[in-house]
C-alpha cells in the first residue's frame, strides 16, 4: 500500500513529515477535481498521480471520469499521515479493491507523478497509457 505522497508542492513553511502514519477512512464521495475526492467529508489528495486542474479541458475530463468510476459507491482510502494545503494524502480504492489512481493513469486522464511514486506502483499503468498529454508539474520529477 502507500508510503510517500504524490503530486504536491509543500506550502510555504510546510515540510514533508519524517515518518508516515497510515489511517484508513471510508465513506460516501463528492469530488473537488480529478485528483481530490472528498471521502466522508475528508478531502484526499491522491498520491502518485497528477491531473490537470479543473477548469481546463483535461482537468474537467479527469474529474468527470473519476465521477463515472466512483458513481455512488463508497471509497476506502489509506492516508499516509501527510497533508498538502487542506487535504490529507493517500490512495483510494473502490469496494472491489481497484485503485482509482491506477485507473485514471492507465486510461490517460492523469499521469504518474514519479517523485511521489517511489515504489513505482503506477509505472505499468503509465506505460499502458503512453506519455501523459497533460501538464506535468516540475515537482513530479524524481529528486
Image (spheres, rainbow, N blue to C red):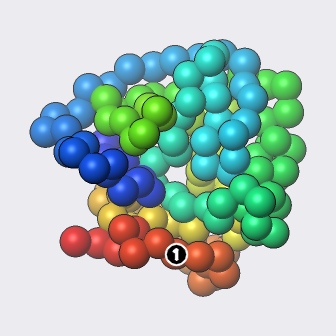
Q: Position of residue 64 (x, y in %)?
A: 84, 50
Q: Is residue 26 left or right of residue 34?
A: left
Q: Nearer the viewer, residue 93 or 28?
A: 28
Residue 123 appears in the picture as rendered: no
Residue occupying the far front of the picture: 12
The 10 Å Cα crowd at callout 1, few under 14, some 14 to 19, many 20 or more, is: some
Q: Quadrant of residue 48?
A: bottom left
Q: Quadrant of residue 38?
A: top right
Residue hosting label 1: 136
Q: Is residue 8 left or right of residue 25?
A: left
Q: Position of residue 44 (x, y in %)?
A: 53, 34
Which image quarter is the C terminus in? bottom left
Which image quarter is the N terminus in? top left
Residue at the image position 28 percent from the left and 50 percent from the top: 12
Q: Position of residue 92 (x, y in %)?
A: 56, 35
Q: Nearer the viewer, residue 112 or 136?
A: 136
Residue occupying the far left of the picture: 18
Rendered position, 13 above or below 94: below
Residue at the image position 65 percent from the left and 76 percent from the top: 134
Residue at the image position 52 percent from the left and 75 percent from the top: 136
* Mark 1, secondary structure of its residue: loop
Residue at the image position 26 percent from the left and 26 percent from the top: 21
Residue 135 appears in the picture as rendered: yes
Q: Nearer the viewer, residue 89 or 11?
A: 11
Q: Position of residue 25 (x, y in %)?
A: 52, 18
Rendered position, 130 above or below 105: below
Amino acid at each position: 500500500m502507500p508510503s510517500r505522497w504524490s503530486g504536491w508542492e509543500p506550502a510555504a513553511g510546510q515540510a514533508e513529515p519524517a515518518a508516515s502514519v497510515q489511517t484508513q477512512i471510508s465513506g460516501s464521495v463528492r469530488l473537488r477535481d480529478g485528483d481530490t475526492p472528498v471521502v466522508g467529508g475528508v478531502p484526499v489528495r491522491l498520491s502518485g498521480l497528477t491531473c490537470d486542474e479543473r477548469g481546463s479541458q483535461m482537468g474537467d475530463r479527469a474529474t468527470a471520469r473519476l465521477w463515472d468510476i466512483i458513481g455512488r459507491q463508497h471509497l476506502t482510502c489509506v492516508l499516509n499521515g501527510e497533508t498538502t494545503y487542506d487535504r490529507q494524502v493517500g490512495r483510494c480504492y473502490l469496494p472491489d479493491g481497484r485503485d482509482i489512481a491506477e485507473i485514471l493513469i492507465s486510461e490517460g486522464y492523469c499521469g504518474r507523478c514519479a517523485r511521489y511514486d517511489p515504489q513505482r506502483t503506477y509505472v505499468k499503468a503509465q506505460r499502458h497509457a503512453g506519455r501523459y498529454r497533460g501538464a506535468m508539474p516540475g515537482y513530479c520529477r524524481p529528486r
